[in-house]
Amino acid sequence: MADYKKMYIHLMQSTEHAIRILIQAQRDCEELYISAPETKLTVLDREESTDGGAD
């Protein structure tokens, strides 16, 4: 007979490990975003439409 308790404990431990990996990856990416240099944005003039149609 299968040892369901052992299977359940293994599944829960593996799930918890996977969740911790995902949380750490998210934190790492957030830190990279926060520490990145500011992006310089340039506003471009809008070209007028020559087809006479509505925008």
Image: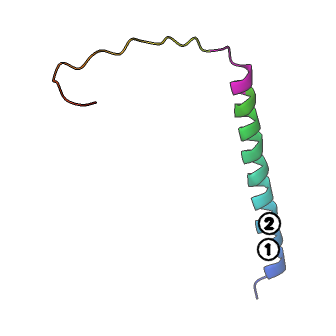
The residue pinned by badge 1 equals 8
Q: SS at mark 2?
A: helix
Q: Which residue is mark 2?
A: 12
Q: In the depicted view, which residue is nearer to us: 3 or 32?
A: 32
What amino acid is found at the position of numbered circle 1 in the picture? Tyr
Quarter containing the C terminus: top left
9 with respect to 36 (left or right):
right
At mark 1, the secondary structure is helix
Q: Which residues are magenta?
A: 32-38
Relative horizontal placement of residue 8, taking residue 46 as reference (left or right)? right
Category of crowding for the residue at label 1, using alpha-carbon neighbours closer than 10 angstroms: few (below 14), some (14–19), many (at least 20): few
Residue 18 image point, x, y percent: 74, 53
User: Whole-percent x and y of residue 14?
Assistant: 77, 60
What colouring style does the render use?
A: rainbow
Does the segment drawn in magenta span residue 30? no
Asked whether 11 or 2 is in front, the reply is 11
- Residue shown at 83% from the left, 70% from the top: 9
